[in-house]
Image: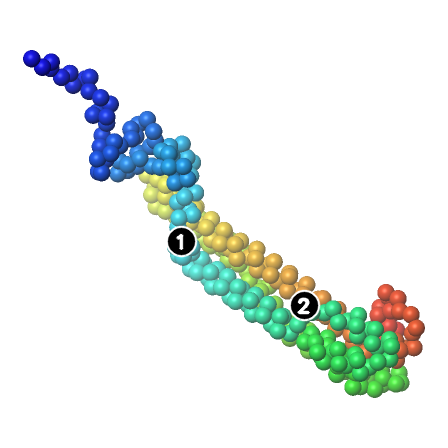
């Protein structure tokens, strides 16, 4: 007579739950955390069950903010948010426009000044003109036009200096084009963000006043969160705009200094030709002499 089977003495495999393919499923309570659909969450790097309960609460607010698209954040900020987004787009387009303009005009290639000074000090105006003709820098164009002017006498040097200075001012004004727009974006964007914050705070407190004694803290916190969002967007727009504006000002200032040096050498090329040795302060000395 066969002995009765004790159900409590069954093997562990017989008591383990089966997966859809017939394999023994792991015990979720011992190996990991169950997701909402009852499956075990596995670490993609190791393949082992992963317990996410410890980090879920800490990262919930960060994940909620990061998970929102940028457009949705801007839309939540209201009209002020869309104005700031438009300003950011204008500033970005203006930056790349100015960068391409600087590259096309050769503003960053200013290493030819020493060679021009060397040719002029040797009295070789032809080599200096050929060198300037191969450069796209605004100073090269101004210097090339200045070499065609006579500087034999003091009156001719003064007239040539005035003409070259007028051309240099036009080049600098052309390089400065668009900088006021970038400056306006850098200054106005944080102020617009602050304006949106003030308007949002006013709206939040108006809702509290309308609620009377039945004040819901979530209404106040939600209103303050949305109000502070405009300030954050304004700062995000203003910080890179300020950096771009300062960088472009530095580039234009350096180009203006190069133009001034080239103009000084071209106007006083007669004095340079009579020098046998050149010091580091020759250009500055000639500039003071021209003034």
Q: Position of residue 120 (x, y in %)?
A: 84, 77
User: Which residue corresponds to the image point at 75% horizontal and 71% vertical from the top-left?
Assistant: 112
Q: Position of residue 52 (x, y in %)?
A: 38, 34
Colouring rule applied to residues: rainbow
Identify the element where label 1 is drawn. loop
List the residue tagged with mark 2.
108
Mark closer to the observer (2, 1): 2
Identify the element where label 2 is drawn. loop
Q: Which mark is residue 128?
A: none
Q: Quadrant of residue 170?
A: bottom right
Q: Is residue 92 left or right of residue 172?
A: left
List the residue tagged with mark 1.
69
Q: Is residue 258 left or right of residue 45?
A: right
Q: Nearer the viewer, residue 118 or 167?
A: 118
User: Which residue corresponds to the image point at 32% horizontal and 39% vertical from the top-left?
Assistant: 214
Identify whether 88 is placed above or below 26. below
Q: Quadrant of residue 23?
A: top left
Residue lying farthest left?
A: 1
The numbered mark, 2 or 1, whose residue comes first in the sequence reads 1
Identify whether 250 is placed above or below 70. below
Q: Crowdedness of circle 2 by 10 Å Cα count: few (<14), some, many (20+)? A: some
Q: Position of residue 122 (x, y in %)?
A: 87, 77
User: Which residue corresponds to the image point at 88% horizontal and 66% vertical from the top-left?
Assistant: 279
Q: Are marks 2 and 1 in contact (CB under 8 Å)?
A: no
User: Which residue corresponds to the image point at 74% horizontal and 78% vertical from the top-left?
Assistant: 132
């Amino acid at each position: 007579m066969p002995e009765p089977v004790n159900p409590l003495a069954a093997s562990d495999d017989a008591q383990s739950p089966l997966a859809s393919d017939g394999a023994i499923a792991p015990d979720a309570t011992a190996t990991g955390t169950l997701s909402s659909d009852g499956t075990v969450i596995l670490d993609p790097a190791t393949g082992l069950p992963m317990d996410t309960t410890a980090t879920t609460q800490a990262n919930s607010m960060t994940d909620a903010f990061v998970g929102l698209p940028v457009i949705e954040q801007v839309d939540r900020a209201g009209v002020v948010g869309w104005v700031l987004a438009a300003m950011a787009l204008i500033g970005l387009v203006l930056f790349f426009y100015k960068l391409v303009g600087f590259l096309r005009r050769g503003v960053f290639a200013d290493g030819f000044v020493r060679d021009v000074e060397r040719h002029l000090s040797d009295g070789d105006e032809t080599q200096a003109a050929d060198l300037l003709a191969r450069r796209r820098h605004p100073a090269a164009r101004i210097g090339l036009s200045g070499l065609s002017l006579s500087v034999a006498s003091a009156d001719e040097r003064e007239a040539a200096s005035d003409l070259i200075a007028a051309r240099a001012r036009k080049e600098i004004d052309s390089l400065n084009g668009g900088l006021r727009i970038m400056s306006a974006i850098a200054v106005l964007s944080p102020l617009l963000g602050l304006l949106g914050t003030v308007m949002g705070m006013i709206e939040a407190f108006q809702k509290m006043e309308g609620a009377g004694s039945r004040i819901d803290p979530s209404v106040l916190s939600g209103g303050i969160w949305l109000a502070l969002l405009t300030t954050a967007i304004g700062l995000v727009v203003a910080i890179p705009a300020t950096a771009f504006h300062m960088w472009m000002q530095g580039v234009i200032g350096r180009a203006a200094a190069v133009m001034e040096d080239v103009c000084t050498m071209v106007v006083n090329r007669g004095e340079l030709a009579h020098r046998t040795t050149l010091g580091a302060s020759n250009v500055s000395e000639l500039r003071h002499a021209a003034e």
